[in-house]
Image (cartoon, rainbow, N blue to C red):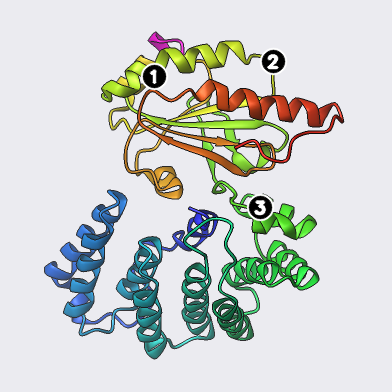
């Protein structure tokens, strides 16, 4: 969950085949089917099966399909199979023909090492040796491609964890220089450049979506406001039991620094729209057709709630029904209002 911000960057890779010589396997129906299966399975969060499908495609290609290997790397990272991701990155590197491809391989190795360094228990220190190895991998990636934004961003995080604040700030600034302002990670990098210490927090993943009313919702633009992200669907019976609580929250917190985003798993747009309208769900609504946002938050079941404080820090995760969501929000909103008024606030609101 901690590294979901990165995954948003890493998974934005072309779904068309790479520009390489067209061998016979590209027209092989079994190869095409394996690629299609991998894509569908990945979207359905069946990561192990998706990896198998892409491995089959690569096998059909004689073990030399860079497109399949790249998909496998991203899925292995997403799935937490970091040793496997490092091994696959080495295979990709052996086929790389450009500095950018070699940089991608090194950056992938750095990501896996960085994510491996995270302690299993919150509050424990990161593994310093793995952090140093990740920094070295990212530096190798940047020597090959100085504009590798993934390497810049994550090397900034690594350096922050190593206590090298100035060096971390420099990497975040360099990242900002090579990405567009509409990149979902832009605001996050901007905040880290201003305050590298934020990179040490468990921030909610950065994302931007267009809501049902056509408005743009960017989590990192919610600074100063508490955010409740609600995953649900019209066909989910427990979600229906939770709806009155959500409607009460939306009503009771009117005018206070709270924003709710409901993220639906509905496949049928008409059913979703009609339900939202009929039930007067007037707060921002988004239909997560490919489960992209769910993957960022690691959601595997609904209803699921995430509360996020004014700094973007993920404060609570609640899966299932029956939670007193409102009490969590009241603490966070009270803290936000106190901060706005310049009053001292408690250090811990979890």
In x, y percent, where is residue 155?
Answer: 63, 72
* x 21%, y 61%: residue: 49
* x 52%, y 76%: residue: 110
In x, y percent, where is residue 82?
Answer: 40, 72
User: What crowding class fits label 2: few (fewer than 14 Cα within 10 Å), some (14-19), or many (20 or more)?
Assistant: few
* x 42%, y 12%: residue: 244
In x, y percent, where is residue 139?
Answer: 63, 82
3 and 2 marks in contact (CB < 8 Å): no
Which region of the structure is painted magenta?
277-281
Q: Dividing the image into 4 quarters, which one contains the C terminus?
A: top right
Q: Is residue 210 left or right of residue 49?
A: right
Q: Is residue 278 magenta?
A: yes
Which residue was labeled with disc 3?
A: 188
Q: Nearer the viewer, residue 91 or 346?
A: 346
Q: Is residue 157 magenta?
A: no
Which residue was labeled with disc 2?
A: 255
Q: Nearer the viewer, residue 232 or 336?
A: 336
In x, y percent, where is residue 7?
Answer: 48, 58
User: What crowding class fits label 3: few (fewer than 14 Cα within 10 Å), some (14-19), or many (20 or more)?
Assistant: many
User: What crowding class fits label 1: few (fewer than 14 Cα within 10 Å), some (14-19), or many (20 or more)?
Assistant: some
Kindly report the distance in space between the C-alpha atoms of the residues bearing marks 2 and 1.
22 Å
Disc sitting over residue 242 in the figure: 1
* x 41%, y 63%: residue: 14
Where is 270 relative to 58, above or below? Answer: above
Q: Is residue 40 left or right of residue 119?
A: left
Kindly report the distance in space between the C-alpha atoms of the residues bearing marks 3 and 2.
26 Å
């Amino acid at each position: 969950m901690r590294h979901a911000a990165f995954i948003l960057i890493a998974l934005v890779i072309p779904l068309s085949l790479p520009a390489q010589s067209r061998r016979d396997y590209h027209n092989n129906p079994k190869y095409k089917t394996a690629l299609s299966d991998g894509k569908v399975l990945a979207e359905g969060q069946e990561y192990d099966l998706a990896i198998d499908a892409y491995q089959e495609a690569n096998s059909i290609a004689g073990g030399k399909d860079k497109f399949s290997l790249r998909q496998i790397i991203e899925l292995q990272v997403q799935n937490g199979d970091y040793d496997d991701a490092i091994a696959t990155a080495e295979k990709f590197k052996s086929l790389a023909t450009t500095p950018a491809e070699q940089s991608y391989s090194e950056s992938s190795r750095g990501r896996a090492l960085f994510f491996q360094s995270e302690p299993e228990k919150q509050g424990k220190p990161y593994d310093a040796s793995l952090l140093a190895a990740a920094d070295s991998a990212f530096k190798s990636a940047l020597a090959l491609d100085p504009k590798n934004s993934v390497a810049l961003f994550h090397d900034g995080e690594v350096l922050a964890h190593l206590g090298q604040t100035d060096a971390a700030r420099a990497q975040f600034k360099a990242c900002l220089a090579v990405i567009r302002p509409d990149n979902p990670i832009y605001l996050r990098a901007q905040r880290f450049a201003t305050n590298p210490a934020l990179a040490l927090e468990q921030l909610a993943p950065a994302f931007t979506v267009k809501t049902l009313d056509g408005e743009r919702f960017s989590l990192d633009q919610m600074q100063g406001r508490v955010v409740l992200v609600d995953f649900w669907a019209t066909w989910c019976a427990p979600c229906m039991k939770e709806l009155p609580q959500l409607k009460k929250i939306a009503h009771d917190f009117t005018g206070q620094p709270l924003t709710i985003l409901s993220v639906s798993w509905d496949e049928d747009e008409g059913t979703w729209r009609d339900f939202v309208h009929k039930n007067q769900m007037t707060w921002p609504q988004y239909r997560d057709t490919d489960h992209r946002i769910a993957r960022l938050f690691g959601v595997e079941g609904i209803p699921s709630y995430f509360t996020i404080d004014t700094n973007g820090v993920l404060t609570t995760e609640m899966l299932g029904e029956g939670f007193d969501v409102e009490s969590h929000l009241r603490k966070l909103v009270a803290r936000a209002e106190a901060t706005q008024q310049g009053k001292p606030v408690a250090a811990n609101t979890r």
